[in-house]
Image (cartoon, rainbow, N blue to C red):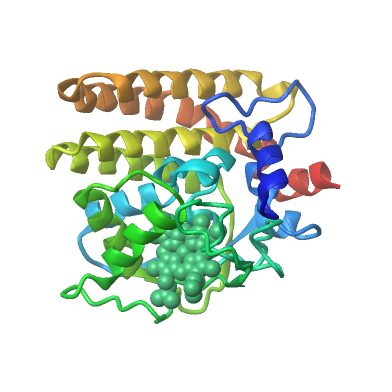
Amino acid sequence: MDRGGARIRKLIALTALFLGVAATPGGAPSAFEQLRWTAPGAELALLSEQPAACLAAGDEPRIRAGRALFGAPTLLGGQAAKAGLSCASCHINGRDNPHFLLAGVSAAPGTADVTNSFFSAARGNRRFDPVVIPDLAMPGKVSRDRETRALEAFIRNLIVEEFGGQEPSPATLDVLATYVRAVRACPGERSVGRRLGDQLAAIDDGVAGAQLMIDRADLQGARLSIASMRHQLGLIAERYSGSGLTRERDGLLAASRELQVIGDSDVGRIIPALGRWKGEFDKRLAKRLRRAEGRSLYDADRLAKTLR
Ligand code: HEC
């Protein structure tokens, strides 16, 4: 068994993607999915800060659709998806993650071996050779040229060969590559705090993505976009722990279940149902979450206390 084997089984046992649920008994510290691959001692830094990214102007719906899929664990297959890993786990906001540490995958924090049999039996090269996770805002070894489509080919390989994911549809690859090409550093700003607004924006991205995918007759892409929204609801639920926020957690769980039903429905029903869902979400739950944000673990002081 490769080095990651035992560790990944433990991860999967722990996994409460928002498919099961992230709710914890009242008052208990919540389990943060992202801490499963975070270096000890870096928990507060990872959960309170994130690398800033600015997006190049361009085809906004495609960029947003790509950003949604970039954060969806179900885009990757097998072990990675089960553990809750997405592209964004290693490339936060399309950039890097200096705190990434996963036994069997990383050597030092901020490194990963994406050719490891940990992720894929097909591609595993049986050598442990982690490298620094690159910042996708910087020019790298893969050309971003639109004509050659080397980036699309690279991403396809990552998903299918390295992470054992399903063959991505042309629209899925197209929006992922469009997003990666649009990621930029922000002038004068290295990192920014984490806020409820991050998840709410990602949920908007998911709706934009589902719409775009349905327009392109891509049901698989639409379902992935909806899965990305459910994952974001799970990330919010992690932060609304404690007995005073039961209503918010229950609301998140109900909203996630509704999305599941929408994702499983006939192709012709998805967009109208998603529109209704989003209208309702914005009118009620999103407002309630915003009002309670100061009492949630998006609040830096409360977060620090929980992690102590
Ligand atoms: C487990 C951490 C991890 C995950 C998850 C991950 N990557 Fe990466 N990514 C890396 C590492 C490490 C490299 C450098 C690989 C190398 O140099 O051989 C890399 C390289 C890349 C590059 C090439 C950058 C360059 O040098 O030009 C792109 C583009 C990229 N990743 C996109 C993605 C996308 C899209 C996903 C999701 C489908 C993804 N990554 C998921 C760790 C990760």
Please name the residue shown 20% across and 50% down the image.
171
Q: Where is residue 268 shown, x and y percent of the image? A: 15, 23
Q: Is residue 168 left or right of residue 198?
A: left
Please name the residue shown 56% across and 48% down the image.
195
Q: Nearer the viewer, residue 133 or 291?
A: 133
Please name the residue shown 55% across and 43% down the image.
79
Q: Where is residue 204 shown, x and y percent of the image? A: 35, 41
Q: Is residue 188 left or right of residue 104?
A: left
241 lies above or below 37: above
Q: Where is residue 261 shown, x and y percent of the image? A: 35, 18
- State the residue lying farthest toward the right: 308
Please name the residue shown 19% across and 39% down the image.
218
Q: Nearer the viewer, residue 297 or 118?
A: 118
Q: How many marks?
A: 0
Q: Image quarter for residue 276?
A: top left
Q: Is residue 144 left or right of residue 236?
A: left
Q: Where is residue 59 shown, x and y percent of the image? A: 20, 60
76 lies above or below 293: below
Q: Nearer the viewer, residue 54 or 31?
A: 31
**Residue 129 seen in this snapshot:** yes
Q: Image quarter for residue 219?
A: top left
**Residue 91 seen in this snapshot:** no
Q: Is residue 39 left or right of residue 157?
A: right
218 lies above or below 115: above
